Amino acid sequence: MSPAARPDKEAAPRYLLVDGHSIIHSWPELRSLHTRQPGHARRELIRQMSDLHDSGRWRVTLVFDGRAGGKEETPKDSLAVLYAPVDQTADSIIERIVQAHAGKEEIGVVTADHAEITAVESFGAFGFSPDWLRDELRVAGQERTDFLENYRRKKLT
């Protein structure tokens, strides 16, 4: 499947792996923030991915290079944030997760790295671009807004 293609909501992969630094360097506002305050850029991306995860459209795992590996402690069923160990990359972590889940469930991977998209698609995952992710965030935000407006209208009547 083409990384620019967007499946409809029902056919969408249920599990989304996001290459954090690839997105930060692809989105001008995050790239600019990253040059001044890398930690703030990561936290802003985490916030946005949490919103997407919490929308119910995806189970999201955000993977970053660095920090000597590990996982941020998060409540069950919330966004997972992973850090690749020093001797590995986010790409290698993403590929290992995709391989481990091959055939078990549908997985989408978001990255600007075309070689990485080719690799994960060879394991059966869907590859998506940073632009696709931005559109997905917009759609999830609009769904949330529509839901709240409908809820308020029903409550007032």
Image: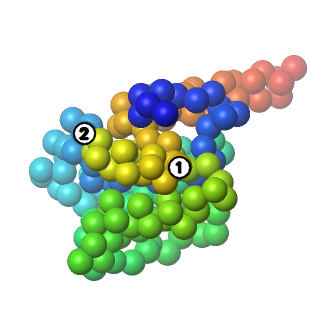
Amino acid under disc 2: Ser
Label 2 sits on a secondary structure element that is: helix
Residue 114, image quadrant? top left
Q: Is residue 2 left or right of residue 141?
A: left
Task: Check residue 150 in the rendering and tell me which mark sits there, or answer none.
Answer: none
Please state which of the two labelled residues, at mark 2 or mark 1, is closer to the viewer.
Answer: 1
Q: Which residue is mark 2?
A: 26
Q: Position of residue 20 (x, y in %)?
A: 33, 54
From the viewer's side, name the closer residue of 40 and 23: 23
Percent x, y for residue 105? 65, 54
Mark 2 → mark 1, Cα distance in angstroms: 24 Å
Q: Is residue 106 visible?
A: yes
Check the image and report above or below for 88 versus 18: below
Circles 2 and 1: CB atoms closer than 8 Å? no
Q: Residue at x 58, y 29 (%)?
A: 7
Q: Residue at x 12, y 50 (%)?
A: 35
Comparing 75 with 8, the one in front is: 8
Percent position of residue 154, x then y: 83, 24
| Quarter of image, res 13 | top right
Circle 1 packing at 10 Å, graded few (<14), some (14-19), many (20+), is some
